[in-house]
Amino acid sequence: MLRIICPAEVTSPIRWTMGLDAHKLADGHHSPVEKEWESLVDRKSIAVLFVEDSQDDVFLLVQEIKRSDIDVQFERVQSPEALRDALNTHEWDIIISDHSMPSLTSSEALEIVQGKDPTLPVIIVSGAIGEQVAVSLMRQGAYDYLLKDRLSRLGESIRHALEDRELRRVNQMAIRDLTVKNWAIQSSATGIVMSDLDGLIEYVNPAFLDLWGFEGARQVVGSLNIKSFLDLHADNRFAQLLTSGGWREELETQNRLGETLTLLTSASVVTDNAGEPISLMCTYLDISERKKLDSLRERANILAAELEKERELRELKSGVISMLTHDFRTPLTALSIHLSLLEKRGDQMTEAERMQKFRLLHDQIKRMDDLVEEVLTVRLDEQSGVGFMPIDTDVVGLCADTFAELRLAIGTRHVMRFQPELEHLMMPVDRKMLRKALINLVSNAVKYSPDDSEITMTVKADDAELRIVIADQGIGIPETDQALVFHSYTRGGNVTHQQGTGLGLTIAKEAVSAHQGYISLESAIGQGSIFVIHLPLQDG
């Protein structure tokens, strides 16, 4: 379609649309010239700005363009102000200007256009123009000039103008691209050397000269071989470069100044568009400082690991001392009191009173035994997973049995609910370790939950993992303490009245970790806690 837009200078703007059919060869195919033209403009309308005081002449020009099978969108202007405004507000592909108008000449139009975009082609059309004037306009920058009674070349002139503009644009982009790449190579911190296929060096960048200790390119280019800058087996590496197309490796070497360097070397064969080798290129990145930093970092990591072990040992000692001074002293004091009472007044007590004292003694001894067992369990679990023996187990059944035992032991103090979402699930687990984790998590829930509150265990699974969820309605764990609750001898900051070693969650974590799983935690003060054991399911 051809869209005609009359300029604002026309009192009554008129809009026109004209059908435009492509001219074809007799066999129905476009000629090579037409195909090239289609490739250039992609069959889209070109934007033409007419600098013309006669609307009738514009229509004649449009008809001539139409006969050349060119779709066009255009505007007409006839004053310097309108021309500048059109150039500033629209993108144009070509300018077609009358030579002489009441308020503007073609020379003035050329000057205005070139001031805006020197690459925008301008074609001069005139009723009569002398050869000397035409030559002067061409020197000023006009692309072509045509007489109004000889417009048969207009379509061809437009095509050539747009093709030339596109070629200039492509060339300018190529020159800019080459300039940018050359600047990047020249300013790169990576040393670059290029040679012919025999290895004779043809180019080096400044970084290469600095890296290897040369003062200028003349010391290298045309006189040295690229083999001199490969490793000790240069001949073999050179042959490998030609056959394999390149390599990348670290190179330990010395430069001309005797400095020891560690270089990350990359060698490659440069090929032409047909894939034929035309030159060789090697790049050298100095990683000497990086290697030194890596060495220092490795030493720092080793030192940090040793310090961490020392810190853990100090925490362990501190925890053990705290446990001995608090958790062991309490039952020992109770044992001492009850034994003293039995010694002094045992013969005055009734049988029921003596049995009560013996039960209290037994409870305190049992408590101390449990404390020792927890400490030993943690120490054994820290010794590289000693004793981990997984066997195929119905995990749902194991959870049900363990929860039933705990419900029986706890009695009616809490509402205990077991809520499995599947009946059976066979997977390899260490029954003893997983049972220990379940007991510690449920015991933890019981310990920090008020009487008559609900404690639930839910078992669920998807394609990736098994999840055992233990939820309570207890006091909750402060957010600041949640990252620490699985550490040995650590308890929540809001726990002051409950006795214990602070090892229960540590034991649970170690047991689950032995199964390549983990425990997640959600908790809020006064809203209870949810511990979730995540165990990965094996494929198949």
Image (cartoon, rainbow, N blue to C red):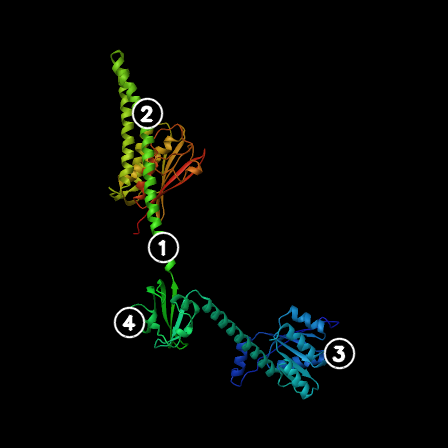
> Within 10 angstroms of label 4, few (less than 14), some, or many (20 or more) residues?
few
SS at mark 4? helix
The answer to whether one can see residue 99 in this image is yes
What is the number of the mark on residue 359?
Answer: none
What is the number of the mark on residue 294?
Answer: 1
SS at mark 3? loop
Relative to residue 333, is residue 471 depicted above or below? below
Q: Amino acid at mark 4?
A: Asn
SS at mark 1? helix
Going by the image, does 523 lie left or right of 225?
right
Q: Amino acid at mark 3?
A: Pro
The residue at 33%/28% (across/down) is 325
SS at mark 2? helix
Q: Amino acid at mark 2?
A: Thr
> What percent of the width, then of the height, locates residue 213?
39, 67
| Residue that label 2 marks | 330
| Residue that label 4 marks | 236
Relative to residue 398, is residue 128 depicted above or below? below
Q: Mark 1 or mark 2: which comes first in sequence?
A: 1
Gap between marks 3 and 1 measured at Cα: 79 Å
Relative to residue 247, is residue 308 depicted above or below? above
